[in-house]
Image (spheres, grey):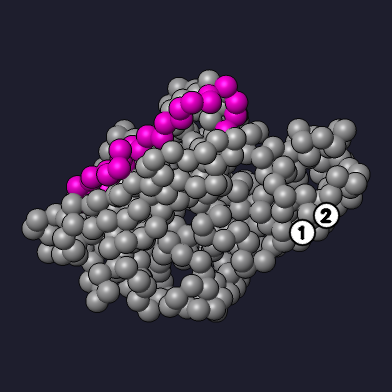
Amino acid sequence: SAEYFSQEDCVGITVRVLRTTVTNVRSTVDISSNNGTATQRGDYTFVVGRLVFEPGETQKIFQVLINEDAYNEGLENATLVLQNPQNGTLGAPGNAQLRIVDDAPETTGNPIDDSRTFVCTHYHDFLYRQSDQSGEDFWTQNIESCGDNAQCRVEHRQDVSTAFFLSIEFQQTGYLVIRAHKAAFGNNKQTPRYALFLRDQRQIGEGVIVGQPGFQQRLDQNRERYLEDFVSRPEFGAQFPNAFNAGAFVDKLFQNAGVQPTAAERQAAVNAFGAGDIPGRAASLKSVLESDSVFSALYNPSFVLMQYYGYLRRNPDDAPDNNFSGYDFWLAKMDGFSVAGENVRDEVVALRRVRRAEMVRAFIESLEYRGRFAGSSDLGNQQGPNQQTRVGGYWARELARAAPTLFDQKLLRFMLSD
C-alpha cells in the first residue's frame, strides 16, 4: 500500500513488504522513516531496521508504533522508506505515507497521566513493540489499584517504569545490544547511538513476547542470528581482523568494555572462539557479553543511556543538552549509589541500586518527557529544558506483583518481603 492510516492512539499498525520475481535467494532491505508533519518521539516511534527474506519467502511485515498526545495537529504524515536492497532491486512504490488522524476533540489533560497510556507507551519506548493485551492490562491494574491515593500512584508509576528495564525481555534484548556495541567499539558515551540501538533492538527482539509459548526458543534464535550478523559487519571486522587469534580477540573485547576478566571468564571466551569462523566469533563475543564482569561494569552506563533512549527518545548530547553534561550528571549519581563489589547480574542487587539512585521518577516527571505528550509550545516535536530534579521517596513494594513471568523468582521473593 502507498498509504497507511492510523487514528492517533497508543497503537501499532502493520506494514507489509512483498518480494516478487526472484525469490529463491536470500535478500535484505533496510526500512526507515522520515519525519514530515508527524515526528518521531511525539507522534510515532522512529522506524529503523532490516528485513531479511530467506529463500522462498515473499512477504515480511513490520510494526509502526503510533503515540497518543493532546496536541491539536490535524492530519499528520511521515514517510516510510525502503532502501539499500541486497540481492534484489526496489520496485514501486519504494516508500509509503504514514498518515495519523488527530483526535477530535483532544483531551484537556496530559495523556501520559492516564495509566493505560503510560503503560502502553513504555512498551513502545523500552521494548520497541506494541503491548500484548494481558501485559498491558496487568501493568495498568498495578497502578489503578491505588485508587485515589495520589502518593501510591506516584510510587506505582515509578515501579512499573523501572520494571521495564529490569524485565527479562529488555535485559536479553536491549541491554545485550548495548553491551555488544560497547565491547566491540569501546565503553564511551556515544556507543551505541540512538538510531543504531533501535535498529539492533528491533532485530534481536523480533517476535519475542516474554511469557508467551515458545518465546525462549525464538529469543535464543534471534540472539544467535544477531551476534553472527554483528561479527560479520565491516565495522566489526575493521576492529577485529581475521588475523586475530582467540586470545587477541577476547582480550580486546574485555579491554573495550573496560574490565579485567577473571581467568575463568577469559578462558571460557577463548574456548568458545573455536576455529575463529563466524559462529566461533559470535560464540566468543556472547561469552564475553554474558560474563559477570562485563554485565556489572556496563550496567550503570547502559541504565543512564536508556533513560535518554527510552523516555526522551534521543541521544544524550542532542538538543536541548547539546553536550553530555546531563548524561555525566546522572552517571555520577548512579555510580555514587553503587557499592563496590556488588554484582548487578543478581537482580536483587540491581533493584537495590536503582532504588538508591532514585533516577526514574526524575525522568518520568521531567518537562521534556511530559512535553512529548502535552504542554510544550513546540507541540512535542522538540525537547524543552531537561529537568534534573533531586527526587525523594522510595521504590515501592508493588513491583513484586508486576508480571511474574518477567522476573527471576528470587527477585520476586525479595520484593514481596521488602
Numbered badge on residue 190: none
Q: Which segment did they paint magenta? A: 1-27
Q: Which residue is drawn at 39% across and 40% down?
A: 92
- Secondary structure under the numbered disc 2 in the rendered image: helix
Q: Which amino acid does label 1 sit on?
A: Asn
Numbered badge on residue 256: 1
In the displayed structure image, the side of residue 48 where residue 377 appears, left or right: left
In the displayed structure image, the side of residue 403 where residue 408 appears, left or right: right
- Secondary structure under the numbered disc 1 in the rendered image: helix
Q: Where is residue 137 in the image (x, y as percent from the top left)?
A: 28, 38
All told, the count of numbered labels is 2
Q: Residue at x 27, y 74 (%)?
A: 378
Numbered badge on residue 252: 2
Q: Position of residue 249 (x, y in %)?
A: 85, 48
Q: Position of residue 1 (x, y in %)?
A: 30, 38
Q: Does residue 290 belong to the magenta stretch?
A: no
Q: Which amino acid does label 2 sit on?
A: Lys
CB contact under 8 Å: marks 1 and 2? yes
> Is the residue 10 above or below the residue 279 in the image?
below
In the displayed structure image, the side of residue 304 where residue 394 appears, left or right: left
> Looking at the image, which is closer to me, 178 or 340?
178
**Is residue 252 visible in this depiction of the protein?**
yes
Q: Position of residue 283 (x, y in %)?
A: 75, 36
Q: How far apart are marks 1 and 2 (CA)?
A: 6 Å
> Is the residue 103 above or below the residue 325 in the image?
above
